Image: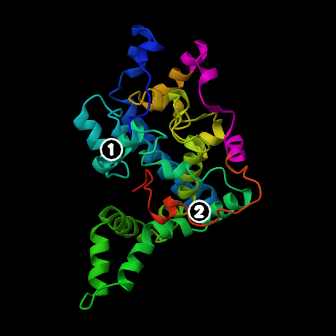
């Protein structure tokens, strides 16, 4: 089928207005990556000094793990640095990685946004759901069930279904080799922190956030961006939703301007740090009235859980079964 309808910058901006919006900074993208890692380290230090703050640290670190994934997403659009080689190095080695595979997948999402061939359509298709279903999904996220289904269940299924002569240890070794960052990061962090009595730092302050808060905020971000948008939506100003985010939301749910998702779909090569300015200019020109926006994440969740009665779609979602890949690899 044909690709989704698109807009041209010249339809909304003069050349003088558009040039600074499209410009890629040599320092802003790297600075955002540095910010994410510094916040993670500061939250971890806070939790190690004051263990009572561990729940807060888990939320902060999980949100910055999402932030790193968002910056990798920017790298997939070539927006982290004006030099594409530097851009790709930053996106591959200082964020979750897997940039080449993600770029091919994600650009397909932009090409066919909310159309039948959109590879992310499964993320928005189930909505609206019932409030009970949404609560169940949130519980599965916060208790690590979503993480287990995405990351670990395939290993146990592979071991259970191994062929005659196959070794379970061999399957495990192959699994470990396929995830070098995870296991090397764990080994190095534990080796560095254990002599100081903080052997628990990596499982509690990296793995736990990635297994609980990260799946939750990834889900809420996915809901805010595309839930309740009709399939085959023809209007390019309504393929994605922009959601107003205050300081608390930016800290714990929507880092690095990810809430400006309608603007991102309209002009996908604009760096994330230029999206707020893009939003303000569109608002000044009266374009915002035709765009899909929401006043808050609470409002979006209310819309997404507005399905009353009937069958409760409370089972595993496509992303939980691993059918649809999220930004986090």
Locate residue 150 relative to residue 128 in the image: left or right.
left
Q: Are the residues flagged by discs 1 and 2 in contact, CB closer than 8 Å?
A: no
214 lies above or below 159:
above
Residue 198 position, x and y percent, is 48, 69
The residue at which mark 2 appears reads as 141
> Which of 199 and 105 lies nearest the eye of the viewer?
105
Find residue 242 and report its horizontal and vertical position in percent: 58, 33
Residue 224, above or below 268: below
| Closer to the camera in the image, 61 or 294 | 294
Q: Residues within 10 Å of mark 1 (few under 14, many from 20)?
A: some
Q: Nearer the viewer, residue 159 or 212?
A: 159
Between label 1 and label 2, give the one nearer the viewer.
1
Q: Secondary structure at mark 1?
A: helix
Name the image quarter holding the N terminus. Answer: top left
The reply to whether the magenta stretch includes residue 53 is no
Per the image, the residue denoted by label 1 is 103
Query: Residue shown at 41%/80% (left/top)?
Result: 156
* Residue at the image position 30 percent from the left and 65 percent from the top: 180
In the visual, does 317 lie left or right of 95? right
User: What range of the chain is rendered magenta?
Assistant: 280-303
Residue 51: which quarter of the image? bottom right
Q: Nearer the viewer, residue 245 or 114?
A: 114
Rendered residue at 35%/25% (across/down): 24
């Amino acid at each position: 089928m044909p690709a989704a309808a698109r807009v041209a910058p010249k339809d909304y901006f003069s050349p003088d207005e558009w040039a600074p919006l499209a410009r890629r900074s040599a320092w802003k993208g790297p600075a955002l990556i540095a910010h994410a890692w510094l916040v993670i380290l500061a939250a971890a230090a806070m939790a190690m000094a004051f263990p009572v703050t561990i729940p807060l640290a888990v939320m902060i670190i999980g949100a910055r793990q999402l932030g790193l994934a968002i910056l990798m997403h920017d790298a997939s659009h070539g927006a982290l640095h004006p030099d594409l080689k530097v851009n790709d190095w930053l996106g591959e080695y200082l964020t979750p990685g897997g940039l080449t595979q993600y770029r091919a997948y994600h650009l397909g999402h932009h090409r066919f946004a909310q159309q039948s061939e959109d590879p992310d359509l499964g993320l928005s298709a189930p909505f609206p759901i019932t409030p009970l279903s949404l609560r169940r999904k949130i519980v599965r996220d916060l208790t690590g069930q979503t993480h287990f289904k995405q990351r670990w269940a395939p290993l146990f299924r592979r071991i259970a279904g191994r062929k005659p002569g196959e070794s379970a240890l061999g399957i495990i070794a192959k699994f470990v080799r396929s995830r070098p960052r995870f296991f090397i990061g764990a080994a190095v962090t534990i080796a560095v922190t254990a002599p100081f009595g903080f052997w628990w730092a990596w499982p509690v302050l990296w793995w736990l956030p990635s297994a609980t808060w990260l799946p939750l905020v990834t889900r809420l971000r996915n809901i805010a961006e595309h839930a309740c948008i009709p399939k085959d939506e023809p209007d390019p100003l309504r393929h994605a939703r922009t959601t107003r985010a205050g300081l608390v939301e930016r800290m714990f749910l929507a880092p690095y301007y990810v809430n400006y998702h309608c603007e991102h779909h309209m002009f996908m090569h604009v760096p994330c740090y230029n999206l707020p300015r893009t939003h303000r200019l569109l608002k000044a020109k009266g374009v915002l009235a035709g765009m899909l926006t929401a006043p808050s994440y609470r409002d979006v969740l209310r819309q997404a859980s507005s399905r009353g009665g009937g069958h409760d779609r409370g089972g595993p979602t496509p992303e939980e079964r691993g059918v649809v890949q999220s930004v986090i690899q």
